[in-house]
Image: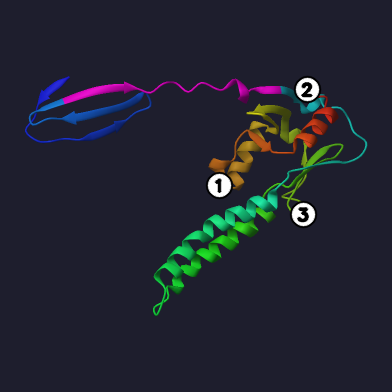
Amino acid sequence: MKEDINTYLLVLLSSNKGIFFITSATKVIDISVHTMPETKKSPTQEYVDYKLTSDLPEITSDIEYKVPNVLKKAIFMAAAHSTPFWGIFFGQGGPDWPWWSLCFIVNALIQLVSPLFNDTASLVRHPGSLEFKNFWGQTIGEPGTFDLYEAVAIKKVRSSHRVYIVRTDAHMNNMKREHKISACCIGKEMELSFSEKDVRKFASDHDLSM
């Protein structure tokens, strides 16, 4: 579509069907539509096996599965967040040292400590519930009974396997209401990156195939 105009235009419009690029010449505007390709779910993201919590085998004692490298990831995250300080503080130098840049060190310390308290470092399967623990071995929230979860599953992601705990819709929506600030981060699935050894142990304990 072309239409005479007297001004220059460069407009970028977006929609759920594609991106419209409007380019202009001196008195002519040319609108071309570029359709965005549909994103297809990768086969590697499909469940390898999926089992409803009502069908899980019973256990008589607690079983623990660990998420490795929680501390290492926290250290790397803190190091990344501290980099502005080193560049600003020592880059500018004295005599008017930019002491305000210490705020990046404070932020880095938060990035170091927060995952150690809030990220899941291990999952404990009890006979009737699941308990999530942090790096210090403290329980995150409260152990969740099986009525809060629909299923457990295993997916193959690239060359490794991941364990997924699938929440019920009611539990997911309740968590979104309780954690309003981070509600957008709460989904149907909870991914647990166990070591391959613990993934196989989890699969064996819950009659899942890999």
SS under mark 2: loop
Q: Nearer the viewer, residue 156 or 117?
A: 156
Q: Name the residue under label 1.
A: 182
Three-letter amino acid code of the residue under disc 2: Ser
Q: Residue 209 carries which label?
A: 2
Is the residue under label 3 in contact with that under label 1 (CB below 8 Å)?
no
Badge nearest the viewer, 2 or 1:
2
Quadrant of residue 177 in the image? top right
Quadrant of residue 155 in the image? top right
Q: Nearer the viewer, residue 186 or 197?
A: 197
Is the residue under label 1 in contact with that under label 2 (CB below 8 Å)?
no
Relative to 49, say whether 140 is above or below: below
The first of marks 3 and 2 along the sequence is 3
Residue at 31%, 22% in the rendered image: 34
131 part of magenta stretch: no
Q: Residue 138 carries which label?
A: 3
Residue 130 image point, x, y percent: 78, 40
The first of marks 1 and 3 along the sequence is 3
40 part of magenta stretch: yes
User: How far separated are the C-alphas under marks 1 and 3?
Assistant: 21 Å
What range is drawn magenta here? Answer: 30-48
SS under mark 1: loop
Residue 103 image point, x, y percent: 49, 67
Q: How many marks on residues?
A: 3
Q: Which mark is residue 25?
A: none
Callout 1 crowding tier (Cα within 10 Å): few <14, some 14–19, many ≥20 = few
Relative to 195, say whether 29 is above or below: above
Callout 2 crowding tier (Cα within 10 Å): few <14, some 14–19, many ≥20 = few
Residue at 41%, 77% in the rendered image: 94
Relative to 35, say whether 181 is above or below: below
